[in-house]
Image: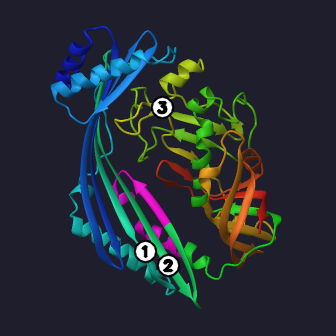
Amino acid sequence: MERLRKWIEDSLKGEYEYEAYIESTEKLLVETSRESLENISKSKEVGLGIRVLKNFRQGFAYTTDLSWTAVSTCVKRAVESLELTPEDDGFVLNKGEFKGQLQADYDQEGLSLSVEDKAELLVNLERLAKNFDRRIVGTRKTSLKEFKVDVNCLNSHGLEYSYTTTYFSCLTSALAVENGEEAISYEYRSGRYLKDIDLEEMARDVVFKATAQLGAVSYETKVIPVVFFRESAVSLLEAFSPMFLGDALVKDKTLLKGKEGQAIASPLLTVIDDGTLKGGVGTLELDAEGVPSKKNIVIEKGIFKGFLHSVYTAVKCNAKPTGNSVRHGYKSLPTSGIRNLYIERGNYTLEDMLRAYDEVFLILDLMGLHTVDPISGDFSLGASGIIYKNGKKEKAVKGVVIGGNILELMKNLVGVGEDLRMYGHVGSPSLLVEAITVGG
């Protein structure tokens, strides 16, 4: 790192502030299908991203070649891009002076497991799904992704940190067949440690969703109470999460602008983003710009508490950084983002919520989430799931559309489940909403 610092400073000749971010990622992908190994792939990528700043202007460039010549050229390209960038008082560097190795979750045991053993885990997951229900005839594909990531970051104000971490994600599917009808569903889990991925729960959930949708029919248009199964609740929360970010506020692309301190949701709703969450996929001592991580309450008992900020958005909004600067690799600039965003668990069981009204629609899958509008809050999404009457399954439905506004949905929240699960960076329990328009 000292050699890199010298190379950069020699190229800049003391005329610019700078930040250097080096990331090395080793990736392993294992895929199985029909209870046999189908594909194995390995890759490694290393790169350097350099930001240079002067007089509230910023330039950026990156390279995959870490030789002196390439680094020098990369610095020159960053300076050239700075000259083309308009002044912006948000272009500043974090002046924190942390220097050292960060404590990060690292799964040596998971990394050392052989590829054959990892494939066997996936094959056993497929078998487990079939054993749970005779109607499960197989899976289309089951995959495990493994990442080992090394990061080094330094800037001209003395900040210098490094860490090594691991990340695992697993995706599976289940195909259910009965009386000529077919239904398929998918399930996803991730964690810093391989052992954190509960394969038995994955199998149980994917089987439940696939078999529950056998024989699905259309449904009439009506306003009805809805339970978002925890995975569908996560999908909705993630789709609307940009409305909580400082970047959306700076760009005037959030419906929450000016609503700090106001009641925007049911008193049952508390939303938290916690960069210190134990075992969280987004957990680390510092954010991507070296700001200490913290637990940020975004919505507390229905009250909107504030936005999640990077250094840039904090300056632009006259706020303090919240430890929410993230990077999507060495090729990208830091930006505001979620760390571990989740809805706080409640006290209701799923069964409680399904019995809460004479008729309830349990939503298992949502489609078209890329179409939601974090600026207006409006959404119109495809959905499938189960109609329950008096707490008992009446029929499976598909091809329906649910529509509304996210603020109205949050205000109509009348039940929060106890079944909180994290799916990557986002988590939620199942949620009961008093009334949503369901279109047949």
Classify 10 Å Cα crowding around label 1: few (below 14), some (14-19), many (20 and above): some
First reached walking from the N terminus: tag 2 or tag 1: 1
Q: Which residue carries the number 2 mark?
A: 175
Q: Which residue carries the number 3 mark?
A: 335
Q: How is the image coloured?
A: rainbow
Q: In this view, does 47 lie to the left or right of 59?
A: left
Q: Is residue 94 visible?
A: no
Is 334 in front, or is 111? 334
Q: What element carries label 1?
A: loop
Taking the magenta stretch, the answer to whether it contains residue 291 is no
Q: Residue at x 73, y 60 (%)?
A: 402
Give me the disc on residue 140: 1
Q: In which quarter of the image is the N terminus?
A: top left
Cβ–Cβ under 8 Å for marks 3 and 2: no
Q: Which residue is drawn at 38% across and 79% down?
A: 127
Residue 378 placement (x, y as % from top left)? 72, 47
Q: Is mark 2 on a helix, strand or loop?
A: strand
Q: Is mark 3 on a helix, strand or loop?
A: strand
First reached walking from the N terminus: tag 3 or tag 2: 2
Cβ–Cβ under 8 Å for marks 2 and 1: yes
The amino acid type, in three-letter code, at marker 1 is Arg
Taking the magenta stretch, the answer to whether it contains residue 196 is yes
Residue 384 placement (x, y as % from top left)? 65, 69
Q: Is residue 91 visible?
A: yes
The amino acid type, in three-letter code, at marker 3 is Thr
The amino acid type, in three-letter code, at marker 2 is Leu
Which range of residues does the magenta coloring cover?
A: 187-208
Q: In this view, does 196 lie to the left or right of 11?
A: right
Classify 10 Å Cα crowding around label 2: few (below 14), some (14-19), many (20 and above): many
**Farthest residue toward the bottom?**
179
Is 341 in front, or is 367? 367
